[in-house]
Image (cartoon, helix red, strand yellow):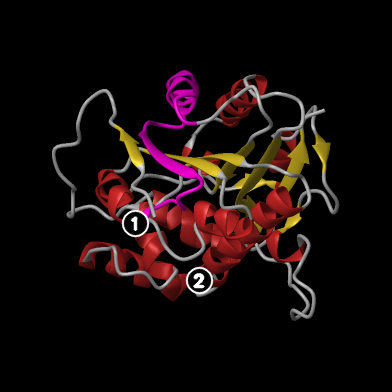
Amino acid sequence: MTDPETTPGPAAHSKIDTSVPHSARIWNYWLGGKDNYPVDEEAGDAYTAVFPGIVTIARSSRAFLRRTITYLVSEAGIRQFLDIGTGLPSAENTHQVAQRIAPESRIVYVDNDPMVLAHARALLYSSPEGATAYIDADVTDPERILAAAAETLDLSRPTGLILSNILGHVGDHKEARAIVTRLMEALPSGSHLSINDGSRGIDPVFEQAQDGYNDSGAVPYNLRTVDEITAYFEGLELIDPGVVSVPLWRPEPGSAPGKVIAEHGGLARKP
């Protein structure tokens, strides 16, 4: 296994703030991980007290990521990935899924959380045939992301762009769409876009819990309607079954019938 490369941000993060709950650490807690602090566990427990289904959403999101990566490698022939907003490393990360099928796959992860940065070198190891790299950057800075990603990826070749539960952190939907558009403009025909995010208009209890979390002082995450999530794929060719609740996106053969939850996503190809 080879060490990942790490590209530092414009300013080094001096410390991890353990006094305020952080979404990446709370998400890690819901996934059963250990990379979190008491403040994150307290926030996570307060959230699940209102909406226990958030654990299902977190784990369904991870399963959706696994299935989309599997499709991209096995059926679309993609061998390089740009995963923005990767969060804390856990089981079935993008490089693990992709390199299990095609060891030569190359993956660039992007996040701007200091705790993610602290764990990137220790946990995001590549197969000898492929490569992984980590960029310390914010999703709202696509130019920096693209420039740094080009040091590891050949952006003239089809690339899988992964935006899993990250666009909700962009407050303005028009800005979020502009970010997606700019990133996809830089990628060639045959590239694919995978997006999944929490959805509004499906479960009012989820919305109550999320609105309460956003009011707590933590970094807010904005739920979007299904139409708003679908709009991210404008101009692209959606892969069947389109934008759906994530358990319904190409469930694995023999799995239990999926149920609609307030997490929608899709995968599309750039013509």
Comparing 94 with 178, the one in front is 94
* In the image: residue 138, left or right of residue 182: left
Q: Is residue 132 magenta?
A: yes
Question: Can you give x and y, in whole percent of width and height, for residue 81 in the image?
Answer: 57, 40
Image position of 36 with respect to 80: above or below = below
Residue 269 vertical position relative to residue 33 in the rendered view, above or below: above
208 or 107, which lies in front?
A: 107
Where disc 2 sits, the SS reads helix
Vertical relation: 175 (above or below) 49: above
Note whether residue 227 is visible: yes
Q: Secondary structure at mark 1?
A: helix
* Residue 61: % across, % down: 59, 60
Q: Position of residue 119 (x, y in %)?
A: 28, 53
User: Which residue is under mark 2?
Assistant: 55
For the point 28% across and 69% down, the residue is 42
Nearest the viewer among 124 and 246 is 124
Q: Position of residue 190 (x, y in %)?
A: 76, 32
Give me the residue at 63% from left, 58% from top.
Answer: 101
Q: Residue at x 70, y 23 (%)?
A: 188
Amino acid type at image mark 2: Val
Q: Which residues, given as a range, are shown in magenta?
A: 123-152
Q: Is residue 238 left or right of residue 148?
A: right
The residue wearing badge 1 is 123
Residue in view at x 44 percent, y 43 percent:
132
**Above or below, comparing residue 85 to residue 39 in the picture:** above
Q: Nearer the viewer, mark 1 or mark 2?
A: 1
